[in-house]
Image: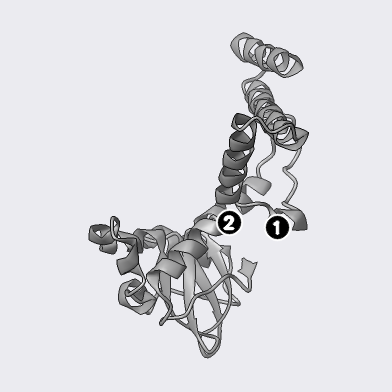
Amino acid sequence: MTPDPLTIGPDDSVASAKKLLESHAIHHLPVVENGVLIGMLSTSDFLKLHILRERPLALETVKVSQIMEAEPVTLDISADLIDVATKLGEGSFHALPVVEPGNLLVGIVTSTDLINHLLMQIPRGDGSLREPPGPEAKSRISDADMTEANRQAKASLDSGASDKLPRAFLQLRDENRLLKEVCKAAELYLRSGLAEREHSVLQQRLSELRR
């Protein structure tokens, strides 16, 4: 689970909840009052407010308690992976708040967490196991922040600024994208039993990266 997850209060506005979800690139927010879980808010709950999407000021007047899922399905701190898989499989949700006695929130488990954990147990094509994410993964820059950084870098270059930092940032972004393509091609190559087509794709991606 993710311990001590980001939370929001029932009296907070929907607008502030939306900002939290977007700035941290997450899809679920436990709703907590004095440490006690009283609901769950997910991005899908905002569909209830679709008529307000063109009226951002109206979002300030709507409280989280008005659109949250009250009495959500929870997971006991002593639960195991079978419990997680069963509850996620039977429900129409993708996150389970983890609680201690008294409904005190201690963590959250999502379907992505479960899938990633299971992937750790499946050998790659070369027989090696995937490495679990290190502590730095928790402090990764969100997708929203990266999008904003890209926008600022492009705007700086478009304005004719002589600062090399924006250009270096965009170059590193492009090189990182190419590296990801090489990794995907390499994994496909290994899983396929070294087929001729996958070998050709891998060579093409490596050539692009060298250029």
Q: Of marks 2 and 1, which one's residue comes earlier in the chain?
A: 2
What residue does disc 2 label? 113
User: Which mark, by number, is residue 65?
Assistant: none
Q: Residue at x 59, y 30 (%)?
A: 158
The foreground one among 112 and 32 is: 32
Q: Residue at x 51, y 72 (%)?
A: 97
Amino acid type for the residue under numbered disc 2: Asp
Q: Residue furthest left?
A: 51
Q: Position of residue 142 (x, y in %)?
A: 60, 52
Amino acid type for the residue under numbered disc 1: Ser
For residue 153, side relative to residue 98 (left or right): right
What residue does disc 1 label? 139
Can you say which quadrant of the picture contains the C terminus? top right
Q: Is residue 86 visible?
A: no
The foreground one among 192 and 111 is: 111
For residue 168, side relative to residue 13 (left or right): right
Q: Position of residue 202 (x, y in %)?
A: 67, 16
Compared with 2, 147 (above or below) is above
Can you say which quadrant of the picture contains the N terminus? bottom right
Q: Is residue 154 visible?
A: yes
For disc 2, the neighbor class at 10 Å (few under 14, some 14 to 19, many from 20) is: some
Is disc 2 placed on a helix, strand or loop?
Answer: helix
Is disc 1 placed on a helix, strand or loop?
Answer: helix
The foreground one among 46 and 150 is: 150
The alpha-carbon separation of the residues under discs 2 and 1 comes to 16 Å
For disc 1, the neighbor class at 10 Å (few under 14, some 14 to 19, many from 20) is: few
